[in-house]
């Protein structure tokens, strides 16, 4: 499947005729709601787990050097925590463009933290899309994230914002937090070098 998914998503008619739809976000949608919404509530979906297995060629990387961003993959017994937004259908034009690099709309049951349930939708990048990178050791994922940048900024920024947002929700995600820890270890030598030389002068810099 081609990575560009706008046309495919525009053909989804599951919620045609609805004035409002609940959208579940599990990645940058948790902390970056750059669209109008009516209501916002912490929520989760069952049977899915968050993984940094999707390539980002347009936001946190480039076509030649893609970053890694979150998608969700099926896992029995798993629960993926995130944020649900009540939106109007007009918002989908923006969301389809934002999630165009391999993400497809999928109808799903959403459970709010207060116990209520509703049918809504989520954007998922599955293994059939051309931008899918697949599983890798979390240390290797951290290394790729550490060196990746794109039009939306450093890939590391995406990871750190997501980890922070999950903590603010009081949620744990071992996969995300392990990558965050590896990233901190990878960045520590550079930070230590800068600290040793005030003003950001590195050990290799000339002093003339």
Image (cartoon, helix red, strand yellow):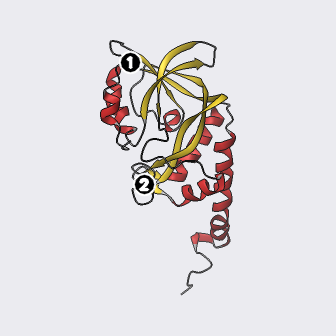
Q: Secondary structure at mark 1?
A: loop
Q: Viewed as shown, does residue 95 lie left or right of 154?
A: left
**Residue 176 at x, y percent in the picture:** 63, 43
Observer-nearest of 166 and 121: 121
User: What residue is shown at x 50% (from left), y 16% (from top)?
Assistant: 119
- How many marks on residues? 2
Q: Counting other residues with Cα less than 10 Å from the Cα at mark 1, is it few (<14), some (14-19), or many (20 or more)?
A: few
Instruction: Determine which of the numbered discs, if any, sits on residue 14 in the image.
Output: 1
Q: Nearer the viewer, mark 1 or mark 2?
A: 1
User: What residue is shown at x 46% (from left), y 57% (from top)?
Assistant: 149
Instruction: Determine which of the numbered discs, if any, sits on residue 43 in the image.
Output: none
Q: Which residue is mark 2?
A: 150
Q: Secondary structure at mark 2?
A: strand
Q: Viewed as shown, does residue 102 lie left or right of 47?
A: left
**Residue 64 at x, y percent in the picture:** 41, 60
User: What residue is shown at x 44% (from left), y 47% (from top)?
Assistant: 131
**Residue 112 position (above or below residue 4):** above
**Residue 36 at x, y percent in the picture:** 39, 26
The image quadrant that residue 78 belongs to is: top right
Q: Residue furthest bottom?
A: 208
Query: Which quadrant would the N terminus be assigned to in this image?
Result: top left
Observer-nearest of 117 and 113: 117
Q: Viewed as shown, does residue 91 lie left or right of 200?
A: left
Gap between marks 1 and 2, in whole Å?
33 Å
């Amino acid at each position: 499947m081609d990575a560009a998914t706008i046309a495919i998503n525009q053909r989804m008619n599951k919620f045609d005729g609805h004035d409002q739809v609940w959208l579940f976000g599990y990645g940058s949608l948790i902390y970056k709601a750059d669209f109008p919404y009516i209501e916002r509530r912490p929520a989760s979906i069952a049977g899915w787990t968050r993984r940094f297995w999707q390539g980002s060629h347009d936001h946190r990387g480039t076509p030649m050097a893609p970053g890694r961003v979150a998608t969700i993959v099926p896992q029995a017994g798993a629960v993926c925590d995130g944020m649900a937004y009540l939106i109007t259908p007009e918002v989908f034009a923006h969301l389809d463009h934002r999630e165009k690099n391999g993400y497809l709309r999928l109808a799903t049951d959403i459970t709010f933290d207060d116990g209520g349930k509703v049918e809504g939708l989520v954007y998922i990048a599955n293994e059939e899309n051309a931008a899918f990178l697949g599983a890798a050791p979390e240390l290797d994922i951290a290394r790729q994230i550490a060196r990746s940048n794109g039009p939306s900024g450093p890939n590391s920024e995406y990871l750190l914002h997501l980890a922070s947002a999950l903590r603010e929700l009081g949620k744990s995600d071992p996969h995300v937090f392990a990558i965050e820890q590896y990233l901190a270890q990878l960045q520590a030598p550079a930070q230590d070098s800068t600290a040793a030389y005030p003003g950001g002068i590195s050990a290799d810099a000339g002093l003339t």
